[in-house]
Image (spheres, rainbow, N blue to C red):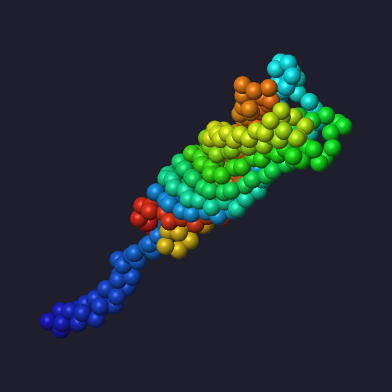
């Protein structure tokens, strides 16, 4: 009996210590959970920047004011460059898809307003070397460029979870108007004439930039784009003896800073 009682006492004394030793082995700490921001989703924003244009008027032919026969251009002042610059403000919207997992692809459209214009003395290609500057200045030519827009694809690489470097390219539009004023006392017209024509020119655009994700799903970006709209031809003062046949080419460069809000998917979770 004494031996049984001693064995029972030893078992009671050892059991708590053994249980305490097993407890750390049975307990496993839950892993930390961290939120991962997603770039996927629809976004809307506004932008402000500048637009610089390289626009060229080339007179391709003239109509003889006496014989009414079309002949080749006169090289004086021809072609003529117009390089208007303007502040540009607008808005943009698009959709991002994040994949693989550091790549972001998307589609974006933008529409902006600027008012860049440039005027020069004379109508290019309508005077001869001996014509005085005062006589040339009785005529004038001007180019004005206002709104522009584009629809583009975007492809970017996340160098950090919150910083995207991207390239972009697509189709673009530019509103252009050209005016020619011709005086009877100037070097070309046999009577006073004035005409304007406007055209929404279609071309292509490419560019790139950087975009950062801020708190609260806000996005901030800086972007550069180049656009080439080709050329458009027009006949000024048609069906007269003062006709001027010309071609206008337009290219632009824009730099802008933008802020947008991403209406994206909820943040994913990573363990």
Residue drawn where x is 55% and y is 34% of the image: 199
Could one spot residue 20 in this view of the protein? yes
Q: Position of residue 102 (x, y in %)?
A: 49, 47
Residue 174 vertical position relative to residue 72 in the rendered view, above or below: below
Q: Residue at x 39, y 64 (%)?
A: 32
Residue 208 lies, in percent from the top left, at 59, 45
- The answer to whether 102 appears left or right of 184 in the picture is left
Residue at (64, 23) in percent of width and height = 240
Residue 47: x, y in percent? 52, 54
Q: Residue at the left extreme? A: 1
**Where on the picture, by quarter, is residue 60?**
top right
> Outermost residue toward the right?
130
Q: Is residue 55 left or right of residue 202?
A: right
Residue 98 in sight in this render: no
Q: Decide which of 110, 145 is in the foreground and name it.
A: 145
Q: Position of residue 93 (x, y in %)?
A: 44, 47
């Amino acid at each position: 009996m004494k031996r049984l009682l001693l064995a029972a006492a030893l078992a009671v004394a050892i059991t708590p210590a053994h249980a305490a030793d097993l407890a750390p082995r049975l307990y496993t700490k839950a892993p930390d959970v961290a939120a991962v921001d997603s770039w996927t989703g629809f976004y809307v924003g506004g932008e402000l920047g500048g637009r610089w244009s390289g626009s060229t008027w080339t007179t391709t032919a003239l109509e003889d004011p006496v014989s009414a026969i079309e002949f080749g251009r006169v090289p004086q002042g021809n072609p003529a460059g117009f390089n208007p610059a303007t502040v540009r403000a607008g808005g943009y919207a698009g959709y991002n898809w994040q994949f693989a997992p550091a790549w972001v692809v998307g589609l974006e459209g933008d529409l902006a307003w600027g008012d860049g214009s440039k005027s020069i003395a004379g109508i290019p290609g309508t005077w001869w070397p001996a014509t005085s500057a005062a006589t040339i200045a009785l005529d004038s030519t001007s180019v004005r460029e206002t709104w522009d827009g584009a629809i583009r694809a975007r492809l970017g690489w996340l160098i950090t979870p919150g910083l995207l470097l991207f390239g972009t390219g697509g189709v673009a539009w530019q509103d252009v108007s050209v005016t020619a004023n011709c005086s009877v006392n100037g070097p070309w017209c046999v009577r006073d004439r004035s005409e304007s024509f406007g055209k929404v020119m279609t071309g292509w655009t490419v560019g790139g930039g950087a975009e950062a994700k801020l708190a609260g799903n806000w996005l901030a970006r800086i972007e550069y784009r180049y656009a080439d709209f080709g050329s458009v031809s027009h006949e000024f003062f048609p069906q007269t003896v003062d006709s001027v046949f010309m071609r206008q080419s337009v290219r632009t460069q824009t730099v802008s800073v933008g802020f947008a809000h991403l209406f994206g998917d909820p943040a994913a979770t990573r363990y």
